[in-house]
Amino acid sequence: MTATNHALTGAAIALAVKKPEFAIPLAFISHFVLDALPHYEPKGIQSGLNSGIQKMKNPAFKIFLATDIFLFIIILTGGPIAFSNHVQWWLILVCSFLGAAPDLTWGRHFYRAKIGKKIINPSSLSRFHIWVQWMERPWGIIVELVWFILMVWLVHNLIG
């Protein structure tokens, strides 16, 4: 699932739950729940630890990723945080970030591959993360778009 969808889901959890002791762990767990849903993967990319390296060579995926990062930053720096009067801004920020945070673990693998070093054995959490992403396909973009629309609608209604 995209970082944007993970962040929007984290924001929705913060806005709906409002209690940090529940919202923060739920936002983190939501990452794996979303990754268990079918989601986008460019055609010809195999799932697994090396998929990110393959993705980074795909020009269409680079545009997709840049757009996702841009939207993610907008969510973290404004969006729900700027307009919510019912929930503390820091809780929305933390939950948005934690909703997407597990994907940051892939950064070290991408970096090592880029500089020509051997990929490190993934941690237990990374292995679980790979396992939970059982359905990544090009048509998963439809699931991503539907989830995005649903989360924008939900966050908008929870703010109002």
Image (cartoon, rainbow, N blue to C red):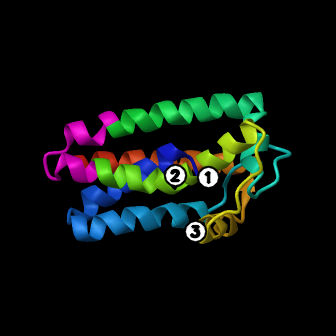
Q: Which residue is mark 3?
A: 125
Q: Which residue is mark 2?
A: 147
Number of marks in the rendered image: 3
User: On screen, 57 above or below 53?
Assistant: above
| Crowd around label 2: few <14 · some 14–19 · many ≥20 (10 Å) | some
Q: Which residue is drawn at the image coordinates 32% and 63% (left, top)? A: 24
Q: Residue at x 38, y 62 (%)?
A: 27
Q: Is residue 95 above or below residue 107?
A: below
Is residue 145 or residue 55 the one in the foreground?
A: 55
- Picture quarter containing residue 58? top right
Label 1: which secondary element: helix
Estimate the spatial distance between the alpha carbons at disc 1 and disc 2, rounded to whole Å: 6 Å
Q: Which mark is residue 143?
A: 1
Callout 1 amino acid: Val
- The answer to whether marks 1 and 2 mark residues whose Cβ atoms lie closer than 8 Å is yes
Q: Which residues are magenta?
A: 77-92
